Amino acid sequence: MKIWLQIADTAGAVLVFLGAAICLLGVVGMLRLPDVLSRSHAATKPQSLGLLLVLGGVALRLRSGMDLATLALIGFFQLMTGPVAAHLVARSAYRTGQIDHSELLFDELDVQLTEES
C-alpha cells in the first residue's frame, strides 16, 4: 500500500511541474506574440491545460474528498470562464479596430457587423 502512495506522490509532483512549465510557456507567448488575437490564444489554451495539470497533481497529493471536490470546482470554473473572457477581449479588440484585417484568413465577423447596421 505504501508503494502506491509514493507512486501517486511522484506522479503528482510530475504533473505539477509539467503544468507549471506549460503555464510558463503561455506567459512567454503572451509577452512575445505580436497581436491581440495571438496573445489571447496564448493566454487561454496553455493556461487552462497547465492549470488542469497542476490541479491533477495537487489532487494526487491531497487525496481527500472535500479537497478533490474543491479542485474539481476550480477546474470547472477555469474551463468555463477563461475561453469566454479571451473571446470577449478578442471581439472588443476587433470592434475597436485593433486587429489588422489583412492578416485574417476568414473575417466572418465583418459580415455580421455590416448586417447589424
Image (spheres, helix red, strand yellow):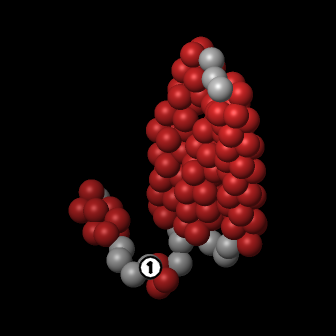
Residue 90 position, x and y percent, is 52, 59
Picture quarter containing residue 117? bottom left
**In the rendered image, which residue does mark 1 sit on?**
104
Picture quarter containing residue 106? bottom left
Q: Residue at x 62, y 72 (%)?
A: 35
Q: Residues within 10 Å of mark 1 (few under 14, many from 20)?
A: few
Q: Residue at x 39, y 81 (%)?
A: 105
User: Extreme top residue here?
Assistant: 66
- Horizontal side of residue 2 vs 99, given as left or right: right
Question: Quick check: can you spot residue 16?
Answer: no
Question: Quick check: can you spot residue 101?
Answer: yes
User: Extreme bottom residue here?
Assistant: 102
User: Extreme left residue here?
Assistant: 115
Q: Nearer the viewer, residue 38 or 72?
A: 72
Which amino acid type corresponds to the residue marked 1 in the rendered image? Leu
Dot 1: element: loop
Residue 9 position, x and y percent, is 72, 36
Q: Is residue 101 above or below residue 116?
A: below
Quadrant of the rendering where the N terminus is positioned: top right
Residue 7 position, x and y percent, is 68, 40
- Horizontal side of residue 34 vs 49, given as left or right: right
Picture quarter containing residue 27? bottom right
Q: Is residue 46 above or below residue 69?
A: below
| Image mark count | 1
Q: Residue at x 44, y 79 (%)?
A: 104
Q: Nearer the viewer, residue 90 or 65?
A: 65
Q: Nearer the viewer, residue 72 or 62?
A: 62
Q: Is residue 23 above or below residue 79?
A: below
Q: Residue at x 57, y 48 (%)?
A: 48
